[in-house]
Image (cartoon, helix red, strand yellow):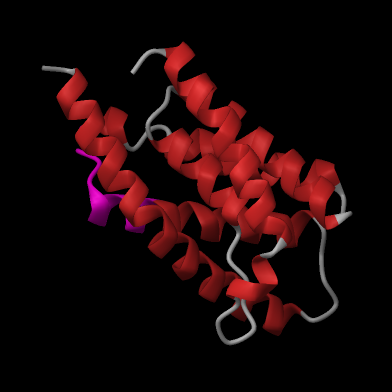
Amino acid sequence: MSSLTRFLIAIPAYYLAAILEMNAHRFAIFGVEPQFLLTTGLVFALFGSPAGGATAGAASGILQGALAGANMVAYGISRTIAGFALSFVPRVGVVVRAGVGFVAVFAASLVANLVLIFLAPRPDLSSALGSTITSAIYNGVIATPFCALFGVAGRQSSR
């Protein structure tokens, strides 16, 4: 996939993720809401270059911080780090499929939210850690079909 194609896919994807993020309370399981913008950024980071991964992470962080009405710098930094790190998964020779996508997005979500807790500490640390782990699992589950779809599309276009 070319950079222009990824960009043209990213605009409506971030738009839809922002709409879903505003209504995330409707998708809550056990009181934990999914992070659609983070998941979108991490899926794009998983299939992009390190610079593209950092950009996708930063975009998701800034949008998520703006929608939350919180410190956008903390969200932007935490998501940029996660996106940049996640973009190296295919570079080490790992073929991205559904299972790899779940584990990678789970781990990157965990890292992004732990960095966010470090940058913008909460008074209730134990509940923040519990919701971070549950949210990371939720994000991995949401990312799994998209990783499978993009992985198949990437293999088809390389033939």
The correct choice, above or below, for 121 with respect to 17 in the image is: below
The quadrant in which the N terminus is found is top left
Q: Position of residue 118 (x, y in %)?
A: 74, 59
The residue drawn where x is 51% and y is 65% is 136
Q: Is residue 112 left or right of residue 148?
A: right
29 relative to 2, above or below: below
Position of 57 relative to 50 (above/below):
below
Name the residue: 60% across, 77% down. Answer: 28
Magenta residue span: 93-104
In the figure, is residue 91 to the left or right of 25?
left
Q: Is residue 119 visible?
A: yes
Q: Quadrant of residue 81?
A: top right
Question: Which residue is situated farthest in the left direction here?
Answer: 159
Whole-percent x, y for residue 73 in the image: 82, 41
Image quadrant in which the C terminus is located: top left
Q: Residue at x 76, y 39 (%)?
A: 62
Tell me where residue 72 appears, x and y as whole percent: 83, 44
Question: Can you see residue 80?
Answer: no
